[in-house]
Image (cartoon, coloured by chain):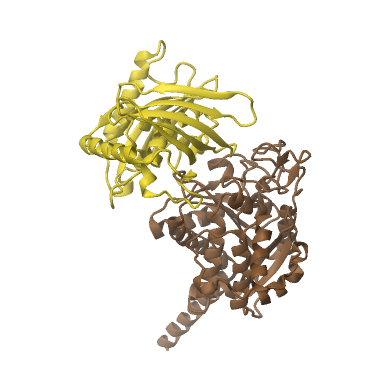
Amino acid sequence: MKPLLGTFYILGMLVPGGLGYDRSLAQHRQEVVDEIVSPWRSLETYSYNRYHPMEEIYQWMSQIREKYTEVVTQHFLGMTYESRPMYCLKISQPSNNPKKIIWMDCGIHAREWIAPAFCQWFVKEILQNYKDNSRIRRLLKNLDFYVLPVLNIDGYIYTWTTDRLWRKSRSSHNNGTCFGTDLNRNFNASWCSIGASHNCQELTFCGTGPVSEPETKAVSSFIESKKENIVCFLTMHSYGQLILLPYGYTTNKPSNHEELIQVGQKAANALKAKHGTNYRVGSSADILYATSGSSRDWARDIRIPFSYTFELRDNGTYGFVLPEAQIQATCEEAMEAVLSVLDDVYEKYWHSNSAEKAMSTAVVLSLLMSFISLL
Amino acid sequence: MQPLRQPLPASRRGNPLPAAPLLALLLLLALQEAAGAPAGSGGPEDSGWHQDTELPRRLLSQAARVALHFFNFRAGSPSALRMLAEVQESRAWINQKKERKVDLVFTTELYNPEEGNKRLGKCSARVFFRNEKPRPAVNVTCAQLIEKKKRHEKDYQLYKRMKQLQNPVDVVSIPDNHGHIDPSLKPIWDLAFLGSSYVMWEKTTQFLHYYMAQLSRVKQWKTNDDAIDFGYTVLLHEFSTQEIIPCHIHLVWYPGKPLKVKDHCQEPHTPEEASGTEEGSAVAPTELSNF
């Protein structure tokens, strides 16, 4: 209730007449809210080095949309269990080029605060630099980014109001005696076969069925609807300093396993070059433990070729409660890793053609030159 | 990516460390075991042991971590706590009872490094997991990272700072929810980590391993002999189940003396609660200098 009260309080302060804010009509009221909420915090003073509660993240998304209106749109995915709207940001450079899609989500597990912090950092970096930075400009020529800063909104809010180490969603089960599904065990990928529990009491509770949770449904439907064009699916977690490939539910390897390892290792090297941090790369079943129903495995199974889970800092020293003082370094190095993956994805789908053309043109030219010199 | 069973070239970190003394160490450990074992020629191929080719990679860092928990507890020094840097070499064996023996060489760094000093210290360990049972048997040796005299001095500084703290400590959790630990409270965190190391070792099995998530409810008591006597609740994070386990820990510490720990943990979803007590033995862990 607190976030509702928080928003209500803010609105109440700014509109003395009071404004009935019905959360279930949130999507329709969004424009009204934008007009009335004159930034009590402006984007210029938004600190990417601090953790932000959900109300502030909602605000931030609106402000991003306002400021970067030429490339950013906000998309509604669905409602959470506690009836909060799920929005993702689409970053797209308008053009006639055919586009492929990169998906990134953060905060599927509530207590992993560094993940939503990274999603915000990522958006900020892309938007602040896409005009001047040739690397990012190139990516945006043919790639659209969809970023979901907080997937498990109800759980995230719960970690702010009640229990900092909460992991699951806040769905109610067993007649209100037990709460929360592990959303990363709820996807339709060998659902609940291994590394997950049918018992609501446990932290890896897989839900009452595959995609039983509204949050999972929202993300699944959205991704399904665009899956032909999605080339890369990134899901951000903490902690452990790992870049994980499919699968978790089996030790069998996907058909592009070698490629995924190469791209992942290159990303880990780029990450390490930034601040010296070591991230290990491997399939989830190999270096972590068996899990089923994960979003990353599901994404790979619906043929999204590059599907990774990132486990961000640290290695257990602070774990979930990573100090704010480490946000910047963690995000900077992770940014290098993600950009490295995106570069490889871009090369695979667009650069190779032009490279071949350049090569053959060069060959023809040099042959011509040598022919002419012989005359 | 590290291959499982092949040792990495010694110059990996640009800091050539001699492989021969390490192999000698491992051999020494193996021989010690052979001396104690009724059958077998020192090679783990006997007594039903055979090389474990399917060792899951996670078990390597798990084994290294539990060896470190044990090392930290035995060293009894909150200012010289170590954390895992990297596992470098490993060999593993398994027997019919599904018990596992893991030999490891790994690097460690100081939990509280001195300004700019990020030296790595090598450790070698043998960890023996008795199937699903906790309290794995650990034999661990580490190269010295802090000079003994300096370590004692730092421990004493920490002790003095603990003594000066207000009681009861007026704080909800350490670190706070944003990961911040007030510098005045850092000694509490370090000492709690020391005590929790014992508990984490005590509970580790092949399948369960722990990290310290957060502290709450700190309380200090006066003692006659001026030792630090304090109690706290630590939230342990168990990795494979993802559970948060609250443990009430009571520890008594005086610099240079072995640590005394009593713990009482709440197991999730079971009515029974597990508890343990330990007094650190007088045997200090072997340290090698000039490594």
Question: Could you say where residue A257 lies in the image, as x and y percent from the top left?
Answer: 58, 51
Report the residue at 32% width, 40% height from top: B164
Query: Which quarter of the figure is the N terminus of chain A placed in?
Result: bottom right
Q: Is residue B172 above or below residue A34?
A: above
Disc count in the image?
Answer: 0
Extreme-bottom residue of the structure? A375
| Chain painted brown | A
Q: Residue B128's image quarter?
A: top left
Question: Could you say where residue A244 lies in the image, as x and y percent from the top left?
Answer: 55, 49
| Chain painted yellow | B
Q: Is residue B98 above or below residue A37?
A: above
Q: Residue B34's image quarter?
A: top left
Question: Could you say where residue A67 lies in the image, as x and y percent from the top left?
Answer: 59, 77
B92 with respect to A119 (left or right): left
Report the residue at 49% width, 60% height from top: A50
Please tell me which residue lies in front, A179 or A267. A179
Q: Is residue A254 above or below residue B271?
A: below
| Residue A19 visible at all | yes
Please tell me which residue lies in front, A343 or A318. A318
Query: Which quarter of the figure is the C terminus of chain A placed in?
Result: bottom left
Q: Is residue B166 above or below residue B268?
A: below
Report the residue at 59% width, 50% height from top: A159
Question: Could you say where residue A269 lies in the image, as x and y percent from the top left?
Answer: 44, 56
| Residue B53 visible at all | no
Please tell me which residue lies in front, A262 or B209. B209
Extreme-top residue of the structure? B38
